[in-house]
Image: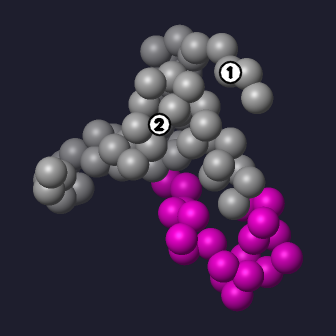
Amino acid sequence: MSHDKLNEEALEALKIAFSYMPKAIDVTKYEYGERYQTVLNHIETVREVLLSNDVDPDEVYGEIHSDIAPNSTY
């Protein structure tokens, strides 16, 4: 899948939305029923767009919620 670079406002909006999405590890058939695979696909799509815009998805939560996120440990 080819992704064009997002402008700064769109990228910031995507990062904010992603920070509220569930973590893939938390998406189970028990919690999400038959939709769990769809939810996982949505999470992966957003991760791919973030990566294609040079954003590390694993760092987004801490960046967006710096007031409540623990400091990185690396």
Residue that badge 2 annotates: 15
| Residue identified by numbered label 1 | 3
| Quadrant position of residue 40 | bottom right
Coordinates of residue 64 in the picture (x, y in percent): 33, 41
Q: Place residue 24 in its image quadrant.
A: bottom right
Query: Is residue 21 covered in magenta?
Result: yes
Q: Residue at x 81, y 69 (%)?
A: 35
**Is 45 on the left or on the right of 26, as rendered?**
right
Residue 31 versus residue 2 in the image, above or below: below
Q: Residues within 10 Å of mark 1 (few under 14, many from 20)?
A: few
Image coordinates of residue 20 in percent, x first then y, are 49, 54
What range of the chain is rendered magenta? 20-39
- Relative to 37, say whether 8 is above or below: above
Q: Residue at x 61, y 37 (%)?
A: 48
Please identify, in this view, whether the residue under mark 1 or under mark 2 is nearer the observer.
Answer: 1
Query: Which amino acid does the dot numbered 2 rest on?
Result: Lys
Q: Label 2 neighbourhood size at 10 Å, few (<14), some (14-19), many (20+)?
A: many
Residue nearest the observer in this picture, 22 or 68: 22
> Horizontal placement of 15 versus 69: left or right?
right
Does the magenta stretch mainly form a helix, a strand or a loop?
helix
Q: Which mark is residue 65?
A: none
Q: Residue at x 79, y 60 (%)?
A: 38
Q: In the rendering, at what x and y percent does residue 2 appear?
A: 73, 22
Question: In the image, what residue type sits under mark 1?
Answer: His
